[in-house]
Amino acid sequence: MCGIIGILGDHQAAPIMVDALKRLEYRGYDSAGIATVHDGALDRRRAVGKLVNLADLLVTDPLPGFAGIGHTRWATHGGPSVANAHPHRAGRVAVVHNGIIENFRELRAELSGDGESETDTEVVARLCEAFLDAGMTPKDAAFATVDKLEGAYALCFLFDGEPDLLVAARAGSPLAIGHGAGEMFVGSDAIALGPLTDRLTYLEEGDRAVVTRSGAEIFDGEGHAVQREMTRIRIDAARIEKAGHRHFMAKEIHEQPQTLSDVLAAYVEGERIAPPSAYDFTATDRIQMVACGTAQIACSVAKYWFEALARLPVEVDIASEYRYREGPVGAQTTALFVSQSGETADTLAALRYAKGQARAILSVVNVETSSIARESDIALPIHAGVEVGVASTKAFVNQLAVLLALAISAGVQRGTIDAAREAELVAGLKRLPGLMAQALAVEDRCEALAARLAEATDILFLGRGPMYPMAHEGALKLKEISYIHAEAYASGELKHGPIALVDRTLPVVVFAPMDPLFDKTVSNMQEVMAREGKVLLVTDAEGAEVASDGVWEVLVMPKVEPVFAPILYAVPAQLLAYHTAVHKGTDVDQPRNLAKSVTVE
Ligand code: G6P
């Protein structure tokens, strides 16, 4: 999603802003721009494509000034072009925006003259300029503008003739104020501001802030001055560097034994599961799990766990469907939202729909200061550290780990798991980081297979039980980063339609650890092979022993108790996608059209 930086400093702002935007690159973007006030005059530079294009432009056409705003854009209204890039300017005002202004057409119709872009954001600058024309001060003009906006936004305004003023506003998209020594900053997340200051104030819904070098005055949506807490943050710089890996995604895949062990340490105490915040699963009759993308797949795996281990029915929904379906939420229902960023607009809106209806709102998040965490009754952290690659890897695995720990805890409370079984499951969990490290050994085979997978135009993924959602994860990862069309089916569903696609050109990846469903999956594999489909079987040594005949390739995974298999089988799903993408030469960390955190509907 878009990234925002604002600076009132005592150095040239342009290079500092380009650096901050670079740290926001992980959000995915298609153009970038900055504006500054220098000798009282507002000016800007914008460029399409990677940030390096903006950096190049600034070499030939520098932009001096100690006060500035900067932006990386992920197109929503109007394609990537210089005219559509932020900052948008109208006369004396420049503005950067993350989110969507839903009533921009109505607002545009009220304004005289034409704009120069196709964006919703430009109307914000034009409206503000109209208020300045009417004689308002910059602060009043910005506030009056914000009053008229509907939709989701984080905004930062900069004004001609005002080298010591930024006005910021937040509704639906996060925004933080950074406090330096005689310098002040605005940023769309802690990563943007990390090296500049460790003291942040997060704006709350509806807040506006008037920022000068001497501090920030914050007002709520009604215009009352409010105090918001200042927090100290620690951004571990090492976690946002590639540490010798070619891509962040590769680094994050390899970090998984460590990050998995970090999260287990927070949820396991001796032989028992001990989540950081207790929740009573005995008084609930069902769980509604809601999320988007990879997080929704984690929920689909967790459904198998909660139903089998705790005998608790689970419904899984895609947030964008759930929020508008207006389905019933029983008073005894537990609503559980899973989101790495904690800011996904659809998931947040779904949470707000369930709030006040459900028995409790639980969330599983990576960012503990996020909106979803703050609006939940209980927020359960996944401790994955900063995830930069757009395609989620270590966050997905840690979401699974937290959901499995919760399912075990629910089973213990509900009497479906006794103390001996709990101890056994905990022992199994503790072995997982080690097994994960062993699972990474399939990397060489994945790399060798990549060349052949990269030739395919379509790839099918199959699985049964919890391996069915894992098939979805394999297909999602592959299409996200390699752009090869991939689909997932429950193995048993193959014969009801998708088998029509099978011919000698179709690779079919089958996730099938040796478990009680193995033989059934092998029968489905035979159906594929009988039609010359190329089966890539991902299984353990025992499975490979009995079912390798006639398959195209086998990836041999470490043996693990079936309940833990989804966590381990995430690794081949990730590595197949990663190496296929690397072979094709696509942009692994910032795949086209995608964004790390989607704060628009
Ligand atoms: C985007 C990302 C996905 C992610 C999804 C949900 O689409 O590209 O990788 O799974 O959002 O994000 P969340 O932050 O809510 O987990």
Image (cartoon, rainbow, N blue to C red):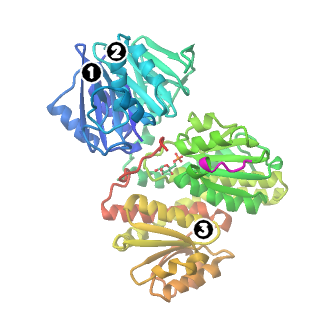
Disc 3 residue crowd, few under 14, some 14–19, many 20+, Cα 10 Å: many
SS state under label 3: helix
User: Residue beneath label 2, please?
Assistant: 132
Residue 120 located within the stretch drawn in magenta: no
The answer to whether mark 2 and mark 1 are in CB contact below 8 A is yes
Q: Sequence-wise, which precedes: disc 3 or disc 2? A: 2
Depth check: 99 or 510 in front? Answer: 99
- The chief SS type of the magenta part is loop
SS state under label 2: helix
Residue ID at (42%, 22%): 145
Q: Sequence-wise, which precedes: disc 2 or disc 1? A: 1
User: Residue beneath label 1, please?
Assistant: 91
Disc 2 residue crowd, few under 14, some 14–19, many 20+, Cα 10 Å: some
Question: Could you say which quadrant of the image residue 67 lies in?
Answer: top left
> Marks 3 and 1, Cα distance to the nearest angstrom?
57 Å
- Percent position of residue 423, x then y: 77, 56
Q: Amino acid at mark 3?
A: Met
SS state under label 1: loop
